[in-house]
Image (tube, coloured by chain):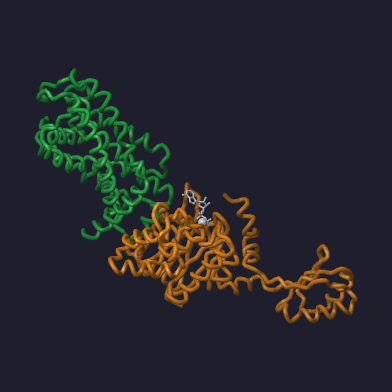
Chain colours: A orange, B green
């Protein structure tokens, strides 16, 4: 802590007078796996594009490795790798030719370049497809090649803008595995944006929740879910629900309870250790229980609590 | 210096690889000037002579003009390609590398020039087949210098304009609207002093006038100005245009 590799100060971007990114102040530590979670149109890509020097902030600035993203663009570009949301490869070139082209632009020469290309190909398991034209690659393979390309010059920071968007479950898990490895083994700071709450939850050490260009929360996934507090025990009841609910109301550790179409929902802390008591109570009241489950709070709930909307609602009404 | 030449080379190399996989594009652009040369040049071959041009036949006179037209077409196709890369999103993948902007401009220009010269030679050989008479074989080599300068200057202009646009849609029209006056006010079709007196003075401010004059000097052995002036004006325009392109690429956004 206290050693930020990226620090954003009042970072803002307006399009036609509307703020796509509104006064963002964040510090990201070296080696951290950092997540930016928010619905479509929240401003995630705009943040990434500013940090990667592709667009200019309208206000504020940021530094990466101590280099200002406006004043020292070349220095910033040298120490970052990026996989844009709509990352693009040259479809008329093979995978290896794509990497070769980019390696040259990063100034890698001769044997160093050839060795590095083999290394990154190996990392994303594309060695056997390296000499196939990219237009023949599947979506998942293209995304992996784009990640390999972003890693070519040993960047200290890797930006991944919705790296698993539009991929099937298997490709998604593959990508999760590579980026986790990169973060752990090669000690790369990773900044990942996503609107999938599981992705942020599983991968990131800290998550900033962004809505309408503003950061509305910033913490570890656990602490964020702690904002919601309790778990929920869900019991599917065939009969005797009313009586059961009455007797459950005497337990002080149940924060709240409700019945909705054949289900009893109980908000409790540490649900796992409470289930036995709840089930015993059900037996004593002769209620017939067909199924008991636990719902833990998700980042989705956190988002709902903070903004009054779900990640999906925004998607439907968004652009 | 060495570094941005290497970056330029890398970009040129990628473009050549892509081109080699879509060869039809290379030849396609030479068709219009080649047809014009055939229909106008052959048609007026024995009707039109310009006394100040040592009575060179019109077909031979027109050939350098059509080469110039091809070179302008290359300006259009090169800036179109840059916009295409932008529209596809590939340009931002290039712009996010620390590669110098001048290297990127020079590389793109170099691949445009390569294609332009290739296409110009199609015109030259087409001309020879139809009966254009060039005064000496070495002239072709000297003309290469002028071809490269004309193509680079107008590619520089095209890229500068392209830096303001985000998509290819409508761009060719706009660029042609700008390029054609250069062509018509350049002596490509007839010596500039025969232009209507209202616009004739403009042609002296048109770098292409000097470029075409240089081409005529190298290919036909006749010219209105001194070849040193032709070379000087073209070289200066080239530097100015590529400089402007680099500046605009340095400060633009690449979303
Ligand atoms: N080039 C642009 N011109 C105008 N508005 C834009 C542009 N890019 C993004 N926006 C707007 O900025 C907001 C944030 O977009 P974006 O950063 O892409 O969101 P996210 O990546 O979180 O989905 C959206 O409302 C979007 O419409
Ligand atoms: Mg986005």
The quadrant of the image that shows the N terminus of chain B is bottom left
Which residue occupies the foreground of this view, B239 or B104?
B104
**Which image quadrant for residue B112?**
top left
At 25% from the left and 58% from the top, the residue drawn is B6
Q: Position of residue B163 (x, y in %)?
A: 35, 46
Give the vertical position of B222 relative to A265 (above or below): above
Q: Position of residue B104 (x, y in %)?
A: 30, 53
Residue farthest toward the top in the current orientation of the protein: B47
At 43% from the left and 69% from the top, the residue drawn is A122
Which residue occupies the foreground of this view, A173 or B19?
B19
Q: Is residue A169 left or right of residue A283?
A: left
Q: Position of residue A224 (x, y in %)?
A: 60, 71
| Residue A55 in view of the camera | no
Q: How many marks?
A: 0
| Residue A310 in view of the camera | yes
Which residue occupies the foreground of this view, A181 or B67?
B67
Q: Position of residue A244 (x, y in %)?
A: 86, 73
Which residue occupies the foreground of this view, A86 or B19?
B19
């Amino acid at each position: 802590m206290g050693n930020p590799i990226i620090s954003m100060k009042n970072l803002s971007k307006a399009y036609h007078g509307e703020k796509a990114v509104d006064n963002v102040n964040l510090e990201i530590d070296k080696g951290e796996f950092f997540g930016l979670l928010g619905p479509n149109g929240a401003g995630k890509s705009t943040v990434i594009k500013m940090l990667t020097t592709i667009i200019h902030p309208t206000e504020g600035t940021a530094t990466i490795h101590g280099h200002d993203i406006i004043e020292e663009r070349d220095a910033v570009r040298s120490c970052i790798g990026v996989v844009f949301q709509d990352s693009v490869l040259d479809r008329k070139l093979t995978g290896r030719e794509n990497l070769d082209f980019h390696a040259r632009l990063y100034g890698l020469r001769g044997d160093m370049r050839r060795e590095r290309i083999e290394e990154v190909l190996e990392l994303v398991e594309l060695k056997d497809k390296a000499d196939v034209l990219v237009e023949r690659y599947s979506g998942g393979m293209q995304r992996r090649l784009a990640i390999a390309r972003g890693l070519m010059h040993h960047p200290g920071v890797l930006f991944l803008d919705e790296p698993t968007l539009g991929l099937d479950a298997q490709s998604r898990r593959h990508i999760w595995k590579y980026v986790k490895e990169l973060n752990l083994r090669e000690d790369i700071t990773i900044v990942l944006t996503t609107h999938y709450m599981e992705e942020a939850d599983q991968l990131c050490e800290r998550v900033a929740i962004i809505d309408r260009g503003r950061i509305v929360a910033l913490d570890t996934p656990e602490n964020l879910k702690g904002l919601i507090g309790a778990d929920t025990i869900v019991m599917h009841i065939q009969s005797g629900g009313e009586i059961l609910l009455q007797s459950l109301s005497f337990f002080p550790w149940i924060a709240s309870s409700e019945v909705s179409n054949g289900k009893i929902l109980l908000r409790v802390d540490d649900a796992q250790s409470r289930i036995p008591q709840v089930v015993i109570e059900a037996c004593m009241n002769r209620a017939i229980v067909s199924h008991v489950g636990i719902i833990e709070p998700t980042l989705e709930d956190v988002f709902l609590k903070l903004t009054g909307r779900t990640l999906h609602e925004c998607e439907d009404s968004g652009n | 210096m060495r570094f941005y030449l290497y970056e330029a080379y890398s970009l040129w190399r990628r473009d050549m690889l892509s081109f080699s996989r879509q060869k039809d594009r290379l030849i396609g652009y030479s068709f219009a000037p080649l047809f014009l040369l055939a229909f106008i040049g052959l048609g007026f071959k024995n009707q039109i002579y310009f006394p100040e041009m040592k009575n060179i036949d019109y077909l031979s006179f027109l050939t350098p003009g059509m080469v110039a037209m091809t070179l302008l077409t290359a300006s259009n196709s090169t800036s179109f390609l840059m916009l295409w890369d932008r529209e596809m999103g590939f340009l931002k993948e290039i712009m996010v590398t620390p590669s110098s902007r001048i290297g990127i401009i020079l590389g793109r220009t170099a691949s445009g020039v390569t294609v332009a010269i290739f296409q110009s030679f199609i015109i030259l050989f087409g001309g020879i087949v139809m009966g254009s008479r060039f005064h000496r074989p070495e002239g072709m080599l000297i003309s290469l210098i002028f071809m490269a300068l004309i193509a680079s200057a107008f590619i520089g202009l095209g890229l500068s304009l392209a830096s303001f646009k985000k998509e290819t849609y409508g761009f060719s029209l706009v660029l042609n609207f700008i390029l054609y006056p250069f062509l018509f006010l350049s002596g490509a079709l007839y010596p500039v002093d025969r232009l209507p007196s209202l616009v004739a003075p403009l042609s002296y401010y048109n770098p292409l006038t000097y470029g075409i004059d240089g081409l005529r000097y190298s290919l036909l052995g006749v010219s209105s100005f001194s070849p040193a002036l032709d070379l000087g004006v073209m070289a200066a325009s080239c530097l100015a245009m590529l400089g402007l392109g680099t500046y605009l690429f340095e400060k633009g956004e690449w979303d």
